[in-house]
């Protein structure tokens, strides 16, 4: 089972970005990532920080550097596909230890290596919504000292990340297979009277047992009125017969996320619960059958809204029917009412149908790969209502 991107793909990613940097007249790109949101660091280095944060420093020519906190050198060396690893104070853990006497690199040192009389004097930062103030201020202050402008440059990397290589696709398949297999085993374990947390404990056990490196996101099982939460955490609430139960299982493998989400009910189920489950399933199948390369993304959202309106469920939706998936479970691009791009081959999406009434809700979620004439569904099972 493939669970790792090869070195040559990491090397090519840096080269591709450097070509884009020259076109955009950028001297340096500095990415940021942390334990919860590592994608802009892991995409170039395979490094996934813990406790501390990290960055990747990419000059328009030459070799990149992995930027880490003072404690992570041996840890990062074991993971990083970038040989040059530098310790900077700004990437220390949030309790801000001082590390007196420890030799540390500064952003001034890094800028001195790159900025000269022939420079564009433009710096791109990637991961701005994640970047803590100490890192941002250190970059901007150094840029001022070198008379450089700082601007956001996420669009350059987003454009690269959203079209997956065959290796990425295979790893994502393997991650989804772990999620689906784990979901099947959770269904064998779940019983009325179990708490939501106990069900999630089974999910966590099985994804690890079947080879996941970690969760793709904090997984959940929620029930009853808790199912109205679009984003949730499990509680000590006991599962009961006849109420909506929502189970989300997501394994991460080689950095890549997967997710399977299903509404479940222990029968007999109230008619209103069954009705919304059926609407969600029909919506899921409708979206899957209409996704293909070349179609404008907003047309998929329009199709979704029209279907819900026809079934008196338009007020049940919160967001569009799909979001990108890759190094994060929810990443660019999203399919929404204002999405003005066309779908392309080898984009990967979660078809994510979240609907809620006043007292209960549900989610149907699966991963698909966009192809020329349709999609490749990663899901091979659980394509009907689950009544236990």
Image (cartoon, grey):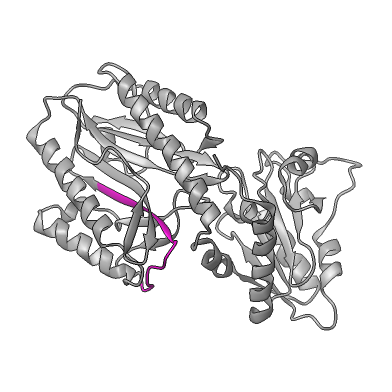
| Residue 321 shown left or right of residue 63 in the figure | left
Bounds of the magenta segment: 340-354
Q: Please provide percent x and percent y for residue 20.
A: 63, 75
Figure disc tally: 0
Q: At x 11% / y 41%, what residue is drawn?
A: 275
Q: Looking at the image, is 348 positioned above or below residue 155?
A: above
Q: Residue furthest bottom?
A: 118
Depth order, front residue of 300/171: 171
| Residue 98 shown left or right of residue 331 in the figure | right
- The answer to whether any part of residue 132 appears in the image is no
The N terminus - image quarter: top right
Q: At x 29% / y 67%, what residue is drawn?
A: 337
Q: Looking at the image, is 122 positioned above or below residue 287?
A: below
Depth order, front residue of 347/144: 347
Q: At x 75% / y 78%, what residue is drawn?
A: 121
| Residue 101 shown left or right of residue 236 in the figure | right
Q: Please provide percent x and percent y for residue 336.
A: 32, 64
Q: Please provide percent x and percent y for residue 379.
A: 34, 44
- The answer to whether any part of residue 342 appears in the image is yes
């Amino acid at each position: 089972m493939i669970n790792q991107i090869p070195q040559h793909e990491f090397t090519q990613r840096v080269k591709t970005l450097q070509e884009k940097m020259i076109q955009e007249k950028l001297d340096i790109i500095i990415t940021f990532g942390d334990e919860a949101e590592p994608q802009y660091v892991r995409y170039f280095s395979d490094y996934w920080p813990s406790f501390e944060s990290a960055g990747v420093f990419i000059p328009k020519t030459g070799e990149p550097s992995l930027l880490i906190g003072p404690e992570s050198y041996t840890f990062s060396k074991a993971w990083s596909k970038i040989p040059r690893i530098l310790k900077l104070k700004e990437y220390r853990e949030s309790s801000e230890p001082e590390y007196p006497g420890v030799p540390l690199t500064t952003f001034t040192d890094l800028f001195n290596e790159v900025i000269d009389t022939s420079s564009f004097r433009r710096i791109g930062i990637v991961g701005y919504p994640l970047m803590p103030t100490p890192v941002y201020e250190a970059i901007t202050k150094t840029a001022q000292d070198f008379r450089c402008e700082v601007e956001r440059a996420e669009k350059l990397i987003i454009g690269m990340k959203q079209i997956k290589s065959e290796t990425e696709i295979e790893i994502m398949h393997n991650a989804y297979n772990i999620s689906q297999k784990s979901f099947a085993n959770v269904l064998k374990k779940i019983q009325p009277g179990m708490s939501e947390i106990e069900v999630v404990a089974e999910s966590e056990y099985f994804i690890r047992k079947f080879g996941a490196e970690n969760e793709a996101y904090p997984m959940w099982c929620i029930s009853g009125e808790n199912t109205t939460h679009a984003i949730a955490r499990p509680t000590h609430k006991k599962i009961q017969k006849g109420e909506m139960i929502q189970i989300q299982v997501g394994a991460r493998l080689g950095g890549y996320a997967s997710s399977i989400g299903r509404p479940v009910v222990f029968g007999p189920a109230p008619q209103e619960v069954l009705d919304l489950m059926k609407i969600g399933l029909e919506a899921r199948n409708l979206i899957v059958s209409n996704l293909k390369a070349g179609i404008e993304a907003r047309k998929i959202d329009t199709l979704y809204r029209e279907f819900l309106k026809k079934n008196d469920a338009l007020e049940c939706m919160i967001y569009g029917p799909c979001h990108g998936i890759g190094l994060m479970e929810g990443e660019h691009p999203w399919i929404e009412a204002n999405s003005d791009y066309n779908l392309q081959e080898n984009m990967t999406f979660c078809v994510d149908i979240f609907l809620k009434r006043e007292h209960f809700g549900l989610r149907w979620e699966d991963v698909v790969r966009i192809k020329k004439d349709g999609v490749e569904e990663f899901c091979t099972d659980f394509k009907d209502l689950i009544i236990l």
